[in-house]
């Protein structure tokens, strides 16, 4: 049913106010009934795009207890007509390059497709997406991405380093598993495969391996199935695993940038420089596919990475020079006497309560496990302690990979969960340790705590002002601590 602007449950200003106070995933209902984009079914889009080739990612339908990263998938260039014929699984149908991939064994995903590029010959379609009704004036489909998939297609669990996310479901349903930033340590983050702005989890969140990833039992999953017309709000730095649950799904999303992203861009630039330097160097163990196919720029040179790092530093410092401390900037009164902050949002004289109800629902936490005490919330716990914990886990993971867990002796394998050999005796034998790999080294070097310290040192050296560097680092360090501890 089409909704006029007057019947929408929230005005653009109200949604902006809600987003400002939301600290958990939530679903907006009854906000998009009059959006033309809801007609963007795969069949409709096939008629619009005609013979235009689209890249599809294909993954095998099997459980392996490990995430199916993009580097492990097959890829084809095909039309949406070929895609639709393949999904119908009719004998003799023209499925183009899909013919090599039986539908019973594979799912397909056209993901990360930027609407500005996909519909560059049909610019009028940009107006079908109305993010302006969420308070983002001038934002439409041109600043959005489209996703087209079959049942079972999924995006590995990951964290977006920039901004926050708004996702509109258009056709079919998708199930989202979201984890708060505080669960980062329980999700075993890695930068391999490398993708700028994405940190992946090593855990298959639907079929986790408890022996390899015991801390995952402490992760808290917030689960929701998104239906057509609904909009999901994914807060900044929330982890998410997404899977299509209907035969064909279509969704549209837009990442909303934040001022805090300027500091994160320095972090990403440092990370990319380190990863590319180590992984692009020929060595015996640099034989895996480490660069995500979605990383369109590919493996850039060290000179290019350094140029990007310097540019990110300049943008950040320019922002510092042209802004005042947040707590000293005066609030303003509008024509109705309401006090507004410097972003134009109405400030609350009393604590604001997010209006959850029939038009806005929180995504519930459906998985709460008993875990080790969350010392992260204790301000006395240092980031060094968290780093030592993370490094210890990396060593244990490496030892398990090489069958050399602590307590594993030359007398035989260890089958006990606590790492004590069944054949242990009073005669202690030195544990056998495997070789440290480039990936092991990278997981430590690009650990967020390490990167945060590097950025602080770079700011001190670049600005020559220890106090400015320290102040600039405070919020970023707090975010890193909140995520990692």
Image (tube, helix red, strand yellow):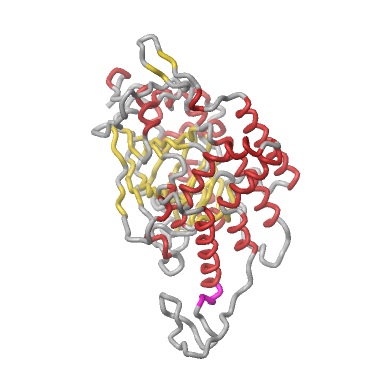
The picture quadrant where one finds residue 370 is bottom left
Number of marks in the image?
0
Quadrant (top left/top right/bottom left/bottom right) for the N terminus: top left
- Please determine whether, in this image, residue 59 is positioned above or below residue 472: below
Point out the residue furthest to the right here.
Answer: 303
Q: Residue at x 63, y 26 (%)?
A: 321
What predominant SS class does the magenta segment belong to?
Answer: loop
- Please determine whether, in this image, residue 217 is positioned above or below residue 84: below
Query: Is residue 217 on the magenta stretch?
Result: no
Q: Residue at x 44, y 47 (%)?
A: 181
Q: Residue at x 66, y 45 (%)?
A: 457
Specify whether 77 is left or right of 377: right
Specify whether 417 is left or right of 28: right
User: Which segment is the magenta one?
Assistant: 402-406
Point out the residue furthest to the top here.
Answer: 335
Q: Residue at x 37, y 59 (%)?
A: 373
Nearer to us in this view, 149 or 65:
65
Q: Position of residue 198 (x, y in %)?
A: 54, 47
- Please determine whether, in this image, residue 296 is positioned above or below residue 432: above
Q: Position of residue 3 (x, y in %)?
A: 29, 23
Nearer to us in this view, 337 or 12:
337
- Please determine whether, in this image, residue 289 is positioned above or below residue 47: below
């Amino acid at each position: 049913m089409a909704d006029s602007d007057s019947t929408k449950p929230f005005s653009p200003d109200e949604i902006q106010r809600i987003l400002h106070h939301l600290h958990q995933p939530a679903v907006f209902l009854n906000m998009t009934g009059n959006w033309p984009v809801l007609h963007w079914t795969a069949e409709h889009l096939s008629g619009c795009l005609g013979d235009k080739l689209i890249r599809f990612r294909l993954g095998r339908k099997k459980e392996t207890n490990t995430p199916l990263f993009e580097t492990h998938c097959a890829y084809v260039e095909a039309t949406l007509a070929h895609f639709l014929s393949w999904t119908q699984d009719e004998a003799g149908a023209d499925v183009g390059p899909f013919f090599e991939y039986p539908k019973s064994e594979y799912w397909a995903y056209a993901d990360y497709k930027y609407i500005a590029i996909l519909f560059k010959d049909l610019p009028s379609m940009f107006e079908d997406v109305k993010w302006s009704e969420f308070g983002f004036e001038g934002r439409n489909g041109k600043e959005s991405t489209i996703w087209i998939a079959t049942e079972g297609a999924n995006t590995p669990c990951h964290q977006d380093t920039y901004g926050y996310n708004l996702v509109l479901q258009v056709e079919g349903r998708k199930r989202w598993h979201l984890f708060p930033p505080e669960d980062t340590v329980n999700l075993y983050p890695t930068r391999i495969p490398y993708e700028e702005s994405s940190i992946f989890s090593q855990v298959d969140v639907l079929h986790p391996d408890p022996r390899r990833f015991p801390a995952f039992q402490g992760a808290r999953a917030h689960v929701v199935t998104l239906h057509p017309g609904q909009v999901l709000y994914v807060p900044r730095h929330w982890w998410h695993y997404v899977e299509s649950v209907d035969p064909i799904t279509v969704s549209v999303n837009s990442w909303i940038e934040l001022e805090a992203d300027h500091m994160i861009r320095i972090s990403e630039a440092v990370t990319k420089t380190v990863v590319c330097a180590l992984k692009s160097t020929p060595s015996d163990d640099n034989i895996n596919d480490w660069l995500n196919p979605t990383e369109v720029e590919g493996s850039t040179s060290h000179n290019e990475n350094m140029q990007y790092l310097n540019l990110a530093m300049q943008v950040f410092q320019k922002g510092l020079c042209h802004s005042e401390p947040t707590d000293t900037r005066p609030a303003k009164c509008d024509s109705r006497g309401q006090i507004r902050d410097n972003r134009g949002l109405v400030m609350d004289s009393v604590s604001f309560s997010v209006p959850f109800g029939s038009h806005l629902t929180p995504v519930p936490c459906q998985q709460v496990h008993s875990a080790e005490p969350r010392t992260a919330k204790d301000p006395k716990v240092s980031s060094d302690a968290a780093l030592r914990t993370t490094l210890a886990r990396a060593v244990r993971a490496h030892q398990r990979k090489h069958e050399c867990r602590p307590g594993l002796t030359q007398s035989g394998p260890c089958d006990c969960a606590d790492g004590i050999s069944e054949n242990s005796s009073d005669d202690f034998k030195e544990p056998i340790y495997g070789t440290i790999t480039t990936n092991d080294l990278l997981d430590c070097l690009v650990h967020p705590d390490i990167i945060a310290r590097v950025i602080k040192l770079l700011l001190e050296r670049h600005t020559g002002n220890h106090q400015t560097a320290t102040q600039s680092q405070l919020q970023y360090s707090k975010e890193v601590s909140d995520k990692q501890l």
